[in-house]
Image: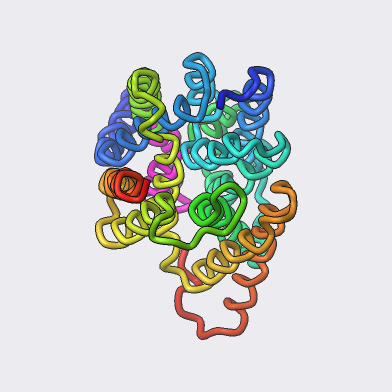
Amino acid sequence: MQREQILELREGALASLGLLVGIVPWGIVAGVAMVSAGLTEPQAVAMSVLVFAGTAQLAVLPLLIAKAPLWVMIATALVVNLRYVIYSGVLAPHFEHLPRRWRALLSYVTVDGVFALFAGRFRPDDGNPHKHWYFLGGSLVMWCAWQLSSGVGIFAGAMIPSEWSLEFASTLALIGVLIPLLFDRAVAWGALAAGGAALLAARLPLNLGLLAAIAVGVAVGLAVARLGPRNGEGRG
Amino acid sequence: MAAESWLVWALIAGMALVAFFTRAVFILPGSHLRLPPTADRVLRYAPAAAIMAIIVPDLALAHGALSISIENPRLVGGLVAFALAAATRSILLTIAGGMLALTLVRYFAG
């Protein structure tokens, strides 16, 4: 490694230390929630390492408990992860000169916080040839913090009696994730419509109800964005 | 409550593929494709819609039937969590308050 690469790696790692206050409790909650939902300890560890996407992990747990079909749970994980498609589009020009192995690694480690730090620091036309080391440094800190805090949650969760209903923590954590998203008017109306539709469609088999509710939510969000005054649009 | 082992492993494998694919979709091909604005919006509205569509039935349904009552522990816990999340933005306070409300309602209504 060259000196400049080490400097960027360290810079990214230091910048992401500020994100730890968010990711550590989040990892612990995810760990406890996975075990409370009935995953064995090896399954929960495998999910943390292989999936490495907290919101998707928490979103499938209430569905797993409700015995939703496998394809619905995977489709839900896909929908919840769609924000990464946006990140991927923003990051692609920064990384296009890198070898495929690098691009695969950086894809796997992408998380919200480091994406925001990176996108705030480097414009797409920034010619810094070592900027991917900054991204890697931040991502490695987040990856380690996530795996360690999930591990703590997994082994703590295994000791907590099931009468405490800690599986409810995944739903509560989802509420915490949802609230900041609702400050965009169209997103908020779309989400409200999806919640209402999910109740109305509860008589349908769960597989259809959830996906129909998402479709209703997206349609209402698009309609609100088209009809309403344009506040909240054009950011992000 | 524990789901069958093969189902959970298949879920983990499927989610791992989905999580990698959504992150790699533009990075791995090294493409210069830009998302059209409508696609960009759909990608922003869908996750919030999905999360709300998971939360609401989990709070408001009890054994498959609508249960809008102060004696429904999950509904009360969820509403407390919504209020705490909006007021504090703290995941820990949100979860702690929601769990406390759930426990109190169970204790007094049960």
The residue lying at 43 percent from left, 54 percent from top is B72
For the residue pair A41 and A130, the one nearer the viewer reads as A41
Residue A204 place in picture, x, y as percent: 74, 54
Image-based side of B36 in relation to A152, left or right: right
Residue at position x 58%, y 31% from top?
A103
Q: Is residue B50 above or below residue A11?
A: below
Residue drawn at x 55%, y 84% is A228
Residue A189 position within the rendered picture, expressed as x and y whole percent measured from the top left: 53, 71
Magenta region: which residues?
Answer: A111-136
Q: Main secondary structure of the magenta part?
A: helix
Residue B26 is at least partly visible in this image: no
Residue at 69% across, 48% down: A206
Relative depth, front residue between B105 and B98: B105
Magenta stretch contains residue B89: no
Vertical placement of B40 versus A9: above or below? Answer: below
Q: Position of residue B23 (x, y in %)?
A: 58, 39
